[in-house]
Image: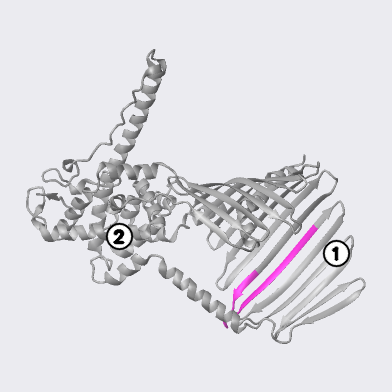
Amino acid sequence: MTATSQNYLKGFIALTVGACFFLQPGISNAQQPGSIMQQKLPQKSLSPHALESLVTGIAFYPDDLVETILEAAQHPLAVRQAADKPTVRIGGGRFAERVQQFNQTADPSVEKLKQYPEILAQLSDNIATTTLLGRAYQSQPDDVWRAIDKLRAEVDAALQQQPEQFVDASGVPLTGQAAYVAAAGYVAGRYFVPATVSELYTAYAHPHQTTAVTTYHGENVNGTATQTTTSGPYGHATASTGSSATTYTGPNGNTVTGATQGGSVVYQNGPTTVGAGAATTTNTGPQGNSATATGAGIAGTTTAGDTTYFGAAGGGTVNTSNGLSAAGAGQVTGSVQQTQTGANYNTQASGSVATNTGVNAYGSRNTSGSVNQNADGSVSGVRNSSTSVQGTNGYADVQHNSSGTVTGDGNGSYNGSTTVDSSKGSASVDTTAGNGQVSSTVTTQNGSTTGTLGDGQVGQSSSSSRSRQSAGSQQAARSSSQQGSYRSSRQSTASNSRYSQSSSQQISSGLQSMQKNWGQLNQQMNRSSQASAASRQKSQSYSQQRSTSPYSGGSNFSPSNSRTPSSSRGSSGYSRGSSSFGGSSRGSSGRSGGGRGGRR
């Protein structure tokens, strides 16, 4: 086997199955009329107490900074990379330039946090808590903001009812921001109870998993599809497995059944996303004949500067019950470069197919073009492509060139030409469009034929289409307004809050609270982790002892579960004489968090 053939077989591991697995249920739904019922199994949500514990580290920042943190927490890997840049020096050249471009590309919310390196460091050092916070905000955004507002209200109440209870190390009552930070710590500490900490640890330790079950019915098709998606603790890797069963009914009542099973993995790392999948589909006809298609694929995309690069490769095999078989492989690469007024793009693709009947073919395609926004609001585009196919039954070469302009009112112009040269003959097609008319000329060895379509109305936007667009925009606006209803309502009533506008004083207070509160929360979660590990070890040891004991056959004893260690108020750091607000830092030690504070 040649090196080129080996490359194609490696590439064979991608496109076919990617399309088969990712699109199969969706295609069934889209192509078949009738009702479609989808049931998404509920994913586990955090309780209000757990959310209140989780937001103790961010609740006391200004609202706009809280929003940025919540968005960034959904990209924990980007947070980690932004906070811990490698110090390895790379020499000059294009490779070093490319690495520098990658390092400069990150999630926008993480980029905003770079102006607050202390906050970014806290999010990175407490990455487990950060990840869990991002998950919670994705699935429970209103609940997260309710928890934040509740904590803030309790701090205000504590300061108003008994301001004298918060004192420094010498017992002198604290005032101003120092009292506020102490009150925030005291309120937060009340939420670090064993049950709540155990809930947070369990939610983080186990992968985040959701399952969707879809049932679809139509005039000629019905079936079900199940997909389970699992994301790892840091959220940058997602695995999916799924299966579907479909029955197609023909006009004579004959049925064809299809079954698909597959899986995929997607990895996201800053500007780079890579996905791979594999699936198998079996279709069985009314006479019992069957065909099984198996394939796999891999695809990826990455952005460096103003250019996005992408690539994919894949392939598959088809085997029938009557002995026919075919194998195919394909790959595609390309890039899109953003310009000031649009984008330039180019792609290269190739593929091959072989059967056990002696029919083989190979093809390649190259495409390039550009899209530009003009000063008058119109959009212009140019496209050129070249396709070549060679096989057992002959060859064909196709060249295409086109250009066009589209205006905002649905009008525009188009000029395109396509030429075909093949072992069966040659032909060309020339098409022009404009002023509501389309004209096309087809030329073959037997002569030319020209046809014209339209009376000046082709391309004109009708009133019905405009009304549909308007209705769609209104529906989208209504849908958007229904999301985050609590957040929207609270923004309109919090204009006079101390959190409504950013201030260096409030950011400093929030950082002190974050350092102390999340430091304690992580300590408790670590203890919960250690207790769980000890419990499992004890259980395993006990089981081994029972298996070797002469009395194990009739024993009904079971090992007692280790209890999660509780956090006493004395160890929380807020009781008089033992509190130390300034000692907390990255994780649980190091960076100064402010003045001392305690509770009388």
Is residue 509 visible in the rendered image? The answer is: yes
Q: Which residue carries the number 2 mark?
A: 146
Residue ranking furthest to the right: 446
Cα distance in 3D space between marks 1 and 2: 68 Å
Q: What crowding class fits label 2: few (fewer than 14 Cα within 10 Å), some (14-19), or many (20 or more)?
A: some
Is 301 one of the magenta-colored residues? no
Which image quadrant is residue 67 in?
bottom left
Residue ranking furthest to the front: 253
Q: Nearer the viewer, mark 1 or mark 2?
A: 2
Q: Which residues are magenta?
A: 370-388
Q: Amino acid at mark 1?
A: Asp
Is residue 115 visible in the rendered image? The answer is: no
Mark count: 2
Is 373 one of the magenta-colored residues? yes
Q: Which residue carries the number 1 mark?
A: 421
Residue found 28% across the figure and 66% down from its top? 502
Q: Main secondary structure of the magenta part?
A: strand
